[in-house]
Image (cartoon, rainbow, N blue to C red):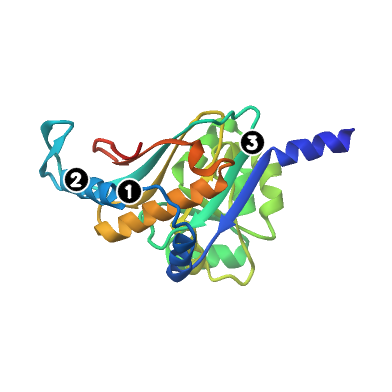
Amino acid sequence: QGRDNQKKKKNHWSSHSLFGTEKQCLEFEEENKMSKLNSELLNSSIDQLLKFSKGETISYKGADVKGKLRKYIETIELQVTLKNYDPSRDKRFSGTFRLPMVPKPNSTICVLGNQKHCEKADQLGIDKMTIDDLKKFNKNKKLIKKFAKKYDNFLASASLIKQIPRILGPGLTKAGKFPTVLDENENLQDKIDSTKATIKFQMKKVMCLSLAVANVTMNNGDIALNVQLAVNFLVSLLKKNWQNIKVLYIKSTMGPPFQIFY
């Protein structure tokens, strides 16, 4: 019976990963021609969003609204509201997908590494911590929470990955930032680039999801491709596909939301 309970608990989650080149992403898009996103609505929404981010005046809900040019790069979020879904009963999905264009080029990464990976991180100017550094947290939950918040992603040497939960507790997992495995002979720069381009959908106890899929320095076509691929991948994770999508919005950091699916 104990084994059956373990199986049930394990099967409560369904996970999927998809990584690839832009060509493979385009092939994935071709396979998802059943997408219900209206390309005209998506492109016009992106156009309005970018105009607002440049400080131009746009028409929004029947009124003229003046945008503002920010001193930093605004990210573009995909905001999702689900329907016909019960988080307490249905399988909670989890999936990662590598976008063709990096949504947040300035996202921060910390390497939790062995000597070789820490030396390489130093050469690349990337923050790093050794196992001895991590032990200094002394399992202090507040310090670990602050540490998890400081970075967008973590990479950990394969030889150390199993020690991290024992040393830090569940802090990184709770923050949704458990480290990505860095194999001994992997190129660190390539791994960083791949990690920055990878988005993660994870169902929690709420019906809303939000994640960065682009930024305002990208052109309309690249933004549209990233949004389309992200949406198609999310739909592929859902039990009833498009029937589980209630509404979709795109929104820049400081701009208004634009509905792209009704």
| Quarter of the figure with the N terminus | top right
- What residue do we see at 38% from left, 56% from top? 226
Expressed as whole percent of the image width and height from the top left, the position of residue 119 reads 54, 66
| Quarter of the figure with the C terminus | top left
Q: Residues within 10 Å of mark 3 (few under 14, many from 20)?
A: some
Q: Which mark is residue 170?
A: none
- What residue do we see at 58% from left, 70% from top? 186
Residue that extends furthest to the right in the rendered view of this protein: 1
Above or below, 245 relative to 229: above
Expressed as whole percent of the image width and height from the top left, the position of residue 246 reads 43, 34
Q: Which residue is mark 3?
A: 139
Mark in front: 1 vs 2: 1
Q: Which residue is mark 1?
A: 38
Say what secondary structure mark 3 lies in: loop
Mark in front: 2 vs 3: 2
Q: Amino acid at mark 3?
A: Lys
Q: Residues within 10 Å of mark 1 (few under 14, many from 20)?
A: few
Q: Which residue is mark 2?
A: 48
Say what secondary structure mark 1 lies in: loop
Is tag 1's residue or tag 2's residue first in the polypeptide sequence? 1
- The quarter of the displayed image where residue 55 is located: top left
Q: Amino acid at mark 1?
A: Asn
- What residue do we see at 82% from left, 34% from top? 5
Cα separation between marks 2 and 3? 47 Å
Cα separation between marks 1 and 3? 49 Å
- Relative placement, left or right, of 171 versus 255 is right
Q: Amino acid at mark 2?
A: Gln
Mark in front: 1 vs 3: 1
